[in-house]
Image: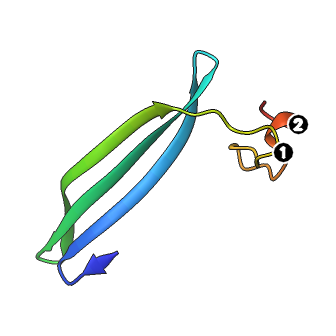
Amino acid sequence: DTNGDRGRVHFRAYYRAGGQWRFLEEHSEFVRESGRWFYVSGETRDESFKPGRNDACLCGSGRKFKRCCG
């Protein structure tokens, strides 16, 4: 999302650590100076996550979690 020379980015990345699913999420602020974007600040969250058995798999295969990485 941009507003002139300021922008915001949100992302969430899933990963497995020690047999447990977790996610890292960040809401970031950027500013454009002389045509280039620079990171200003961000708020992060790193938490455990338990996908449901019938949810789509986090690996992107398109299969159900229980039939893929579960």
Q: Position of residue 51 (x, y in %)?
A: 68, 38
Q: Which mark is residue 54?
A: none
Residue at point 39%, 59% (across, down):
10
Nearest the eye: 47 or 63: 47
Q: Position of residue 61 (x, y in %)?
A: 79, 49
Q: Is 66 left, or right, of 3 in this rendering?
A: right
Nearest the eye: 33 or 25: 25
Residue at point 64%, 33% (across, down):
50
> Dot 2: what SS?
helix
Are dots 2 and 1 in contact, CB under 8 Å? yes
Q: Amino acid at mark 2?
A: Arg
Q: Badge 1, how many Cα within 10 Å: few under 14, some, many 20+? A: some
Residue at point 79%, 40% (across, down):
65
Q: Which residue, given by chain and number where applicable, does mark 2 sit on?
A: 67
Residue at the top extreme of this rendering: 18
Q: Amino acid at mark 1?
A: Lys
Quadrant for the N terminus, please: bottom left
Q: Position of residue 6 (x, y in %)?
A: 19, 74
Q: Which residue, given by chain and number where applicable, does mark 1 sit on?
A: 64
Quadrant for the C terminus, please: top right
Q: Is 13 left, or right, of 42 in this rendering?
A: right
Q: Is 61 left, or right, of 33 in this rendering?
A: right
Q: Is 66 left, or right, of 13 in this rendering?
A: right
Residue at point 72%, 50% (across, down):
60
Residue at the bottom extreme of this rendering: 4
Quarter of the image where one finds residue 34: bottom left
Task: Say above or below: 9 vs 62.
Answer: below
Q: Badge 2, how many Cα within 10 Å: few under 14, some, many 20+? A: few
The CA distance from mark 2 to mark 1 is: 5 Å
Residue at the left extreme of this rendering: 34
